[in-house]
Image: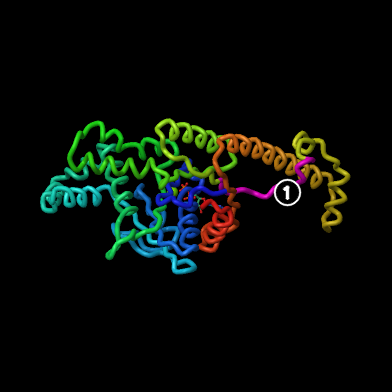
């Protein structure tokens, strides 16, 4: 698998709760593990990155949260629409003082909460600014930006918002900014990855999101299947076991050899567990097939026993590196 080597902006979306933030962080660590300077950024005001790396809430400035092999580093930034708007006014209109006056009368709050389109323009604009920022003496400051993006239901609209702006503003700095955001987002320098589970709802949302992204010409990246469990039973036996056709004398022998009492209730409870497990694995196989039909590269990431610790995050990063997506 390859094809994301030239990607400067990795966008990570997915149904809420599938591990979008966790996988975005693991991806950032994986890229830093190869010596890159990576900016990991979030736009939903949740401070999910700070929680993951166990640091204080991120201010509106980049802060280093991890370092990788070969001099790689991960910086993190929580993009806040209000701060982005103030920065925008200052940058394009030299309006720093006007910005704080607007803030006092609540206009900034109004603009960033009432107009979701405007908010998304500000957020994507800031992402682009970070992705293309130059370091003193030339060259990109960050080799790669990883964006923990809005969930699947909103991601296509979010990324495409600047094309609406381009339709409204015919010229001037706003139009130029909108055009350059769309140029970056539509190019091969961007990939929109989708995190999913092997479950019906997230898989359906992934398929829908791929359709929406393709419809507006946004570059779909990899399907990242998270929280995958190892099957405990041989594949060939699954249909019988799922159908309740189980040799209970075999189960009784198994219980005894494990030093347990093979009472009838114990045997039938175990048979029930096996049936549930087999049905689930079969369902997962079906979902896997649906995901394959999307035709994008795919990586499976294991269900971690202790997801909350950093070691787990590094394990996911290692898996992503092994998958050689870039
Ligand atoms: N591979 C995994 N194995 C186990 N738990 C995971 C894994 N990935 C994520 N989690 C856990 O699932 C929960 C949701 O993850 P999070 O990244 O916050 O999801 P999202 O950003 O999609 O809402 C968190 O408690 C996280 O620790
Ligand atoms: Mg999240």
Which residue is pictured at 24% across the width and 52% down the height? Answer: 83
Q: Which residue is mark 1?
A: 232
Q: Position of residue 28 (x, y in %)?
A: 45, 57
The correct choice, above or below, for 261 with respect to 243 in the image is below
Is-magenta flag for residue 18? no
Q: Is residue 282 left or right of residue 25?
A: right
Q: Is residue 173 left or right of residue 324?
A: left
Task: Specify the segment rendered in magenta.
Answer: 225-237
The correct choice, above or below, for 284 with respect to 72 in the image is above
Q: Position of residue 156 (x, y in %)?
A: 40, 36
Which residue is pictured at 51% across the width and 47% down the height? Answer: 3
Q: Is residue 112 left or right of residue 68?
A: left
Q: Residue furthest front?
A: 138
Which residue is pictured at 21% across the width and 52% down the height? Answer: 87
The one nearer the camera, 62 or 232, is 62
The correct choice, above or below, for 126 with respect to 241 in the image is below
Is-magenta flag for residue 232? yes
Q: Position of residue 182 (x, y in %)?
A: 33, 40
Q: Position of residue 141 (x, y in %)?
A: 33, 60
Q: Residues within 10 Å of mark 1 (few under 14, many from 20)?
A: few
In the rendered image, which quarter is residue 13 located in? top left
């Amino acid at each position: 698998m390859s094809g994301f080597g030239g990607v400067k902006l990795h966008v990570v979306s997915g149904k809420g709760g599938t591990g979008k933030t966790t996988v975005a962080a693991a991806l950032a660590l994986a890229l830093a593990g190869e010596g890159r300077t990576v900016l990991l950024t979030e736009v939903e005001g949740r401070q999910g990155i700070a929680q993951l790396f166990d640091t204080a809430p991120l201010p509106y400035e980049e802060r280093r949260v991890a370092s990788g092999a070969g001099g790689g580093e991960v910086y993190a930034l929580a993009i806040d629409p209000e701060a982005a708007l103030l920065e925008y006014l200052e940058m394009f209109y030299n309006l720093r003082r006007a910005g704080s006056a607007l803030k006092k009368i609540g206009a900034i709050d109004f603009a960033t909460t009432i107009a979701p389109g405007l908010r998304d323009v500000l957020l994507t604009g800031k992402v682009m600014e970070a992705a293309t920022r130059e370091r003193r003496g030339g060259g990109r400051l960050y080799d790669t930006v990883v964006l923990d993006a809005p969930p699947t239901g909103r991601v296509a609209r979010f990324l495409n918002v600047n094309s609406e702006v381009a339709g409204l503003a015919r010229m001037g700095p706003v139009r130029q900014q909108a055009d350059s955001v769309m140029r970056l987002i539509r190019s091969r320098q961007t990939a929109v990855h989708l995190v999913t589970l092997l479950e019906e709802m997230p898989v359906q949302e992934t398929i829908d999101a791929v359709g929406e992204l393709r419809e507006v010409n946004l570059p779909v990246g990899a399907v990242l299947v998270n929280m995958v469990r190892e099957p405990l039973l041989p594949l060939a036996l699954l249909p019988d076991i799922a159908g309740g056709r189980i040799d209970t004398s075999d189960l009784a022998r198994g219980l005894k050899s494990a030093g347990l009492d093979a009472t009838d209730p114990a045997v039938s409870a175990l048979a029930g567990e096996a049936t549930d497990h087999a049905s689930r694995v079969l369902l997962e196989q079906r979902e896997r097939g649906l995901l394959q039909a999307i035709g994008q590269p795919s990586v499976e990431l294991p269900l971690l026993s202790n997801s909350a610790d950093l070691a787990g995050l590094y394990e996911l990063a290692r898996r992503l590196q092994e998958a050689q997506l870039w």
